Amino acid sequence: MKIRVTVNGTAHDSDVEPRTLLVHYVREVLGLTGTNIGCDTSSCGACSLHLNGEAVKSCTILAAQADGAEVTTIEGMASADGTMHPMQQAFMENHALQCGYCAPGMVMAASSLLKENPNPTEEEVRLGLEGNLCRCTGYHNIVKAVLACAGE
Amino acid sequence: MTIIDDRPSAVLGTRRLRKEDPALLTGEAKFTNDLHIPGALHLALVRSPYAHARILGVDLAPALAMPGVVAAYSGADLMGLWAGPMPCAWPVTADMKNPAHYPVAVGKATYMGDAVACVLATSEAAARDAVEAVVVDYEALPAVVDLDDALSDRVIIHEGEGTNRSYTWDLKVEGTEGQVDAAFAAAAYTVSEHYVQQRLIPMAMEPRAVAAVPQPFGGDITLYSATQIPHILKVMTALTVGVPEHQLRVIAPSVGGGFGAKLDVYAEELLCVALARKHKVPVRWNEERGENTQASIHGRAQKQHIELAADADGRLTAVRVRLVADMGGYLQLITPGIPLLGAFLYAGVYDLPAAYDFSCTGVFTTMTPTDAYRGAGRPEATYAIERAMDALADTMGIDPLELRRRNYIRKEQFPYTAFTGLVYDSGDHDAAATLAATLADYDGVRARQKVQNVPGATKRLGIGLISYFEMCGLAPSRVLASLNYAAGGWEAATVRILPTNKVQVVTGTSPHGQGHETSWSMIAAEKLGVDPDDVDVLHSDTALAPLGLDTYGSRSLTNGGVAIAMACDKVIDKAKKIAAHQLEANEDDLEFTGGTFTVKGSPDKAMPLGAIAFAAFTAHNLPDGLEPNLEAQVTYDPPNFSWPFGTHICTVEVDTETGQVDVLQYVAVDDCGNQVNPLIVEGQVHGGVVQGMAQALYEEAVYDSDGNLKTTSLAEYLVPAASDVPPITLGHTITPSPTNQLGVKGIGEAGTIGAAPAVINAIVDALSDLGVTDIPMPASPQTVWKAIHHAQQGANT
């Protein structure tokens, strides 16, 4: 089926199988492999991206459902001059990633969280990120990074 | 013994941000399944839904008729492709049973998820669709999921072996026969404790992925894999697939966590290589999470019996340990050796006389094979001794911290030759415990407990502590030989100063989250007086870094990092010869500081390293007999393990009405010697602690009595989220290792080693007034609630 999706500011007209998931569309059709796949049950959040400005797990949405939508992936977060998004910068400065596999999804979820709640408490950050799993950091520095970014 | 370098440091010890991060944070980093490989066929595997079944027939025809399917094979069809069975590199005893197994099972499946057939198709979706169409005729056989049942040989899994016992390995101290029995007979106090290390699934966030790509000419093949061990994988692939090793290149691209589960040689890696050679096209495979829970190794899975004997003051006089270790359906790369990595640590950090008796039996079951999981043997050992120490303190009626202080190996006893002959390099347990007790307000919590834990109180406060040794840095090759480990423990490094004064460091370590590019560039920068940003670290590609033994067992810094420092020294030695020649000075009169050689007393006579590198490149004016270019290689075999240590203290509140455990505070004081980058050290501890806490509270690979794995997704296997864990308070003491020039020890596994027993000790402490003496892991609300009620029923009868 034919869909038109604007991804990171560029409109794409594509013909996809109806069963194509949004995550497979951005990874395989558009070649945007920064969005990772960590599970098959919508549990881990590694595939989080922004759909019309809100963080969603792209393994839970069909590409067809994104027809006409604006999508931002991790590749679209930095400025055109390469300056990282403040959340990306906060993750780096607070050592909030180790292997980095969850990091794109975490950054997308965390930036969406701050949009909804610009000054969260530590507990609100922990609850707000409970749909995104990390196996390396114990979350300590992820929470620190999000709070630091909120404080800026 | 090397003297510790005590120069004031410009780079080492600083909290330098990681150079790996920008690529990982912007989506530029490439993991294996991100690689664009035109023309690749996709592999998918048909996996046994039975724990134990005879394969009577495999009908591939329906799959072959499906669109996009290129080929399909049963295990028997593939036998001609193998030069040997799947490798086990650790035959722990001469008579160890190691039934041959191949990437796709032949005749029999021995765990749910065991591969029984495979399909190649032009897309991943087509391959997975075709898997559903393969018809396998199984004869279901009884499952074996209980270790005692396995030992009984009621059902023999590998009939040809005649028993489910793979091996029994004993550690006894020569010349001390009878001393353990005598110590127990003479003991003022004894405890006898049984613990279960539940099966865990390592669950790195990146599932495994593999791609084998034939090169366009020369017959070479490149194997990309989400692995911790590209070097070992190269050797093992050559041996099992029969590819000439010199024509095989293994690359581990960005790897999304390992935790031991990517320290293995897997069926899918061997299949991709064999099928890429057969079909002369690239073959790739991406693991789904559900597959990952079954087809990647599991960890822990031991039953432990530990007995302690102590004198009237509580000083340990003997330790006796009996383990049964669950091997799973087959032996993987180092499955049988995992319990041995803990075998030396069941006396913990204590000054034990030569009265130690350890025995472990490895037994086959019809579950996923076990192997290394973060800590590998040492968390199990630390759990047993640290839980048993609390039991001993309870028996004696003294404080657990006081009991430990009476038994610690004292600072002045280091280097300490243990009863096993191993030499513990350095330590100060009392200092680490004192700092941890201060940070945790140990005395304050004890005082609050007296107020809070009154009869009838439903919110009970508990505090638990543990002290540990990590025994890491695998390892001196000769020691590994004495344990029948098939490989060595050395590590390699090359340091190369390029003509434009940029530095390449080539390492045999293979990072997957540890930040080696940052830390190794810091070591080279410190040594050479250059900016860390001018150092590039080449790794995880056997063509760029041909020598190496990879990353596991907290070995990378103590082996690979030290090798880099040594290679820098060699480079500086060579540079000095060139500087002396060109400055017309005596080598002994040269000083090297801040990247520049100067002649003592003549500061105007100087030559920076960059100029020397260029001179070495042009080779116009070198001393006679000196080779051009400025690089040096070192292969370093460490003289000892490294012995990080520390004390962790956990404070919990337990709701006796619901069984809910709230971790109020977790304090970790770890001593890993000198720290190259404290930011990275802290990250390792944070993550390790939460992984250990997850064992204590949340995680378990659950099998039913028919051998069905019930936790095949992240919805059922409870990896904690941010909301499930507390912030962590860290402290460090610094006791440099005397065995290497950087004074460093490992840190990768410390958190995981400490956390599980600290949490369980705290829960048991909270409930001890109610008669609770143990809580099995994971301490779910239901498990805790049952333990409370069981104890109270016992008290009422």
Image (tube, coloured by chain):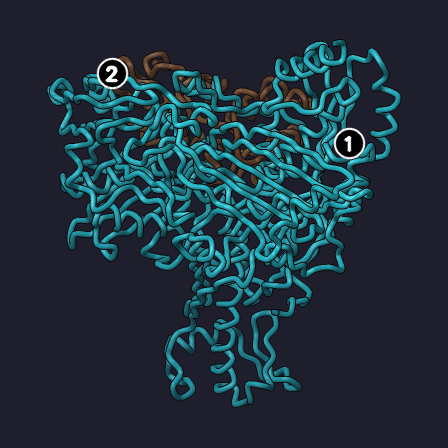
Chain colours: A brown, B cyan
The structure residue drawn at horizontal position 54% and vertical position 49%, both measured from the top left corner, is B171
Q: In which quarter of the image is residue B704?
A: top left
SS at badge 2: loop
For residue B614, say whether it is visible.
yes
Locate residue B354, reporting x and y percent: 65, 53
Please state which amino acid type lies under the numbered disc 2: Glu
Q: Within 10 Å of the Cα at label 2, are there few (<14), some (14-19), or many (20+) other Cα atoms?
A: few
For residue A94, say whether it is visible.
no
**Residues at marks 2 and 1, CA–CA distance in whole angstroms:** 67 Å
SS at badge 1: helix
Question: In the drawing, does residue A93 fall left or right of residue B578?
Answer: right
The structure residue drawn at horizontal position 56% and vertical position 40%, both measured from the top left corner, is A92
**In the drawing, what numbered circle is on residue B343?**
none
The structure residue drawn at horizontal position 46% and vertical position 24%, both measured from the top left corner, is B146
**In the drawing, what numbered circle is on residue A17?**
2
Q: Compared with residue B640, is residue B445 higher up or lower down, i.e. above or below? A: above
Q: What residue is pinned by disc 1?
A: B395
